[in-house]
Image (tube, grey):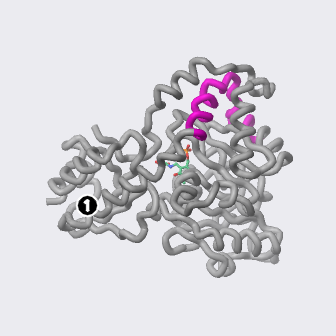
């Protein structure tokens, strides 16, 4: 099977497995796991924040961040296709007791003009805005990348109004590779940033949340409340450290493979891809002109050994990662041409 469903499907490299086996561990709830401590320190450095916290999943990282940056009864502004709203089981409502106020942002990229229209100051009839959430890269918009000026303007204007900004940077390293900036530069102005070790970076599990030391001290308690106090988690952190140091350099290869896939799809009758949206490792493509549903196309691809999931009734998402080669992309394109015919 060639698995293009997500970059979450990567298997740990031999080096990660070796590091996991040899990891020095302790009880992380007592903050005694030296490998977790090293990973948290390294993640904080990379993000340019005072501290970072190792969490089991991106969902938990986002859930904790929203709780940290809001009071119950407030609103969180995010793009309507955001992961926070659509794929996190209403944790913003359940854990932070906040509503999400959506904005339809072109390409998933919010800007201050759009946010200002959705912003609600304290008033007698409505829930005030508590924080803004931006997703970089934006998953369901096709891996799009925020221009840095937009992030900095959003943060500047938000902070002037006393609002906080969280970045869901599940794939921030892809954003960094695509825009040629460091993660530290990208996240410089946001209050908290979450990134995943378990996606394009290829670690078997884990995400990092970074922010001020005071925020991360509170975040540690929320993590425990959510059942995320992981004890000898150094076995996982060891793989995360390898992922952090080694994988970013090869992400441009995944991006080139995604562009190759998108360009190849364009010449398949009935398939449409917005080539200009393909900036990182995600390709969203439309199959409506094949007169087949996305589920049918996905089924036909599976029969041919290619896994690609539908996103809507007419679109599918292909994600490149280190377990997918250029040759695999060529094979997938051949199968897609058959499935679409
Ligand atoms: N995304 C997964 C699915 O949930 C859709 C994927 O296959 O892409 N933020 C963003 C932008 C994400 O893409 C994801 C996972 C998360 C947060 C949550 O991470 P996990 O799965 O670790 O909870």
Q: Would you say residue 240 is visible in this rendering? A: yes
Quarter of the figure with the N terminus: top left
Query: Is residue 15 shown left or right of residue 286?
Result: right
Query: Is residue 184 shown left or right of residue 198?
Result: right
Look at the image and give the residue range highlighted in magenta.
222-245
Where is residue 182? Give x, y as percent: 64, 56
Q: Residue 148 falls in which quadrant of the image?
A: bottom right
Task: Give 18 or 65, whichever is nearer the viewer.
Answer: 18
Where is residue 194? Give x, y as percent: 65, 50
Residue 273 drawn in magenta: no
Q: Would you say residue 314 is visible in this rendering? A: no
Please, what is the dominant secondary structure of the magenta stretch? Answer: helix
Query: Is residue 122 shown left or right of residue 265?
Result: right
Where is residue 336? Give x, y as percent: 21, 54
Quarter of the figure with the C terminus: bottom left
Disc 1 on helix, strand or loop? Answer: helix
Where is residue 165? Give x, y as percent: 72, 63
Q: Which residue is drawn at the image coordinates 71% and 76% (left, top)?
A: 119
Above or below, 219 against 133 in this view is above
Residue occupied by mark 1: 264
Residue 234 drawn in magenta: yes
Above or below, 100 against 15 in this view is below
Q: Which residue is drawn at the image coordinates 82% and 44% (left, top)?
A: 218
């Amino acid at each position: 099977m060639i698995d293009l469903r997500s970059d979450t499907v990567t298997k740990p490299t031999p080096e990660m497995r070796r590091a996991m086996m040899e990891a020095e561990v302790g009880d992380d709830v007592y903050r005694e796991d030296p490998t977790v401590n090293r990973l948290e320190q390294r993640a904080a450095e990379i993000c340019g924040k005072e501290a970072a916290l190792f969490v089991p999943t991106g969902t938990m990282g986002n859930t904790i961040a929203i709780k940290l940056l809001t009071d119950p009864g407030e609103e969180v502004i995010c793009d309507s296709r955001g992961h926070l709203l659509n794929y996190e089981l209403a944790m913003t409502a359940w854990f932070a007791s906040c509503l999400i106020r959506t904005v339809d942002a072109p390409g998933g990229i919010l800007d201050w003009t759009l946010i200002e229209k959705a912003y609600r100051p304290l008033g007698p009839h409505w829930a005030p805005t508590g924080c803004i959430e931006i997703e970089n890269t934006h998953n369901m918009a096709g891996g799009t990348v925020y221009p840095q000026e937009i992030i900095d303007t959003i943060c500047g204007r938000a902070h002037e109004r006393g609002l906080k900004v969280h970045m869901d940077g599940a794939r921030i390293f892809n954003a960094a590779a695509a825009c040629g900036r460091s993660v530290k530069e990208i996240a410089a102005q946001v209050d908290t940033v979450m990134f995943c070790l378990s996606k394009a970076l290829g670690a078997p599990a884990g995400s990092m949340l970074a922010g001020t030391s005071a925020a991360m001290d509170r975040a540690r308690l929320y993590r425990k409340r959510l059942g995320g106090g992981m004890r000898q988690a150094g076995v996982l952190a060891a793989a995360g450290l390898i992922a952090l140091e080694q994988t970013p350099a090869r992400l441009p290869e995944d991006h080139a493979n995604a562009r190759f896939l998108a360009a190849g799809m364009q010449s398949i009758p009935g398939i449409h891809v917005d080539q200009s949206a393909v900036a990182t490792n995600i390709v969203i493509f439309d199959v409506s002109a094949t007169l087949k549903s996305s589920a049918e196309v996905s089924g036909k691809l599976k029969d041919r050994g290619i896994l690609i999931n539908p996103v809507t009734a007419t679109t599918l998402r292909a994600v490149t990662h280190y377990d997918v080669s250029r040759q695999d992309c060529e094979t997938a394109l051949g199968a897609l041409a058959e499935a679409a015919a």
